Image (cartoon, grey):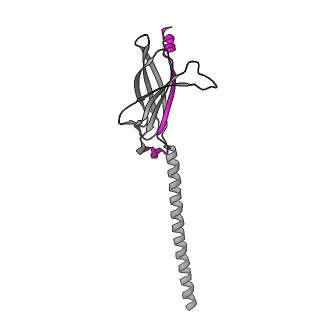
């Protein structure tokens, strides 16, 4: 009888051990599966932003033009994108005449930096957002402009980005040439 009780106790311990092992293994597998699916979901739900930068010219005198920039940002993603005014700006540089050498444009030390908005700006999901900015330029010069939008740092971690510059678009403008094209 004593061997029977010892054997029954051994079987009971083994059964309990197998049950505990199965529960722990199942818990680890469920946690891993959830983490893996969460990682895939975040990749699918990353922001999908695209932009177009256009401009229009208005001649104000023989030497100057007003350039009206229009940036259209499309947020095709599932989440709102919060922008930061300190990291969102329009940068411009004057291009040196006849400067194309080795495929690179040389710029002069004239920097133009314009803030695009104050406070916060939100690009809502599944929408287009239009931003505009006007500046005055010399008519006879050529410029390189870059429109940059930067993420609000509090929300940058949501998109696993490094740094705050989120998206940018560039454009080269020669007002005199563009005005001649329009007058023909």
In the rendered image, the vertical position of residue 19 relative to residue 57, given as above or below: below
x, y (%) of residue 37?
Answer: 52, 52
User: How many marks do you count on the picture?
Assistant: 0
- Rendered view: 64 above or below 31: above
- x and y percentages locating residue 96 in the rendered image: 55, 21
Q: Is residue 85 magenta?
A: no
Tell me which residue sits at (46%, 21%) in the image: 55
Give the answer, above or below, for where 29 lies relative to 75: below
* Residue 171 is covered by the magenta coloring: yes
Q: Which residues are magenta?
A: 155-184
Instruction: From the top left corner, tell me how far across and down residue 116 is, in percent.
Output: 40, 30
Query: Quadrant of the rendered structure where residue 152 is?
Result: top left
* Residue furthest right as drawn: 102
Nearer to us in this view, 91 or 155: 91
Front in this rendered view, residue 135 or 52: 135
Residue 85 point in image, percent of width and height: 39, 35
Q: Residue furthest left?
A: 119
The one of 134 and 21 positioned closer to us in this rendering: 134
Residue at the far bottom: name it. Answer: 1
- Residue at the image position 53 percent from the left and 53 percent from the top: 36
Q: In terms of image quadrants, where is residue 88?
A: top left
The structure residue drawn at horizontal position 53% and vertical position 58%, both measured from the top left corner, is: 32
- Image quarter in which the N terminus is found: bottom right
Q: Is residue 1 visible?
A: no
Q: Is residue 61 visible?
A: yes
143 displayed left or right of 83? right
Q: Residue furthest front?
A: 109
């Amino acid at each position: 009888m004593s061997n029977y009780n010892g054997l029954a106790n051994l079987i009971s311990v083994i059964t309990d051990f197998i049950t505990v092992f199965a529960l722990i293994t199942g818990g680890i597998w469920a946690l891993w599966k959830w983490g893996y699916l969460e990682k895939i979901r975040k990749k699918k739900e990353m922001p999908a932003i695209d932009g177009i930068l256009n401009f229009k010219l208005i001649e104000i005198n023989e030497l100057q033009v007003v350039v009206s920039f229009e940036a259209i940002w499309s947020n095709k993603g599932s989440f709102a994108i919060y922008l930061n005014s300190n990291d969102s700006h329009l940068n411009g540089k004057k291009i040196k005449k006849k400067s194309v050498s080795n495929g690179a444009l040389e710029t002069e030390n004239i920097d133009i930096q314009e803030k695009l908005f104050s406070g916060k700006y939100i690009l809502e999901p599944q929408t287009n957002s239009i931003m505009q900015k006007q500046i005055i330029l010399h008519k006879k010069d050529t410029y390189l402009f870059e429109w940059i939008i930067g993420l609000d740092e509090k929300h940058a971690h949501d998109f696993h980005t490094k740094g705050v510059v989120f998206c940018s678009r560039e454009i080269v403008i020669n007002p005199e040439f563009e005005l001649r094209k329009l007058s023909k």
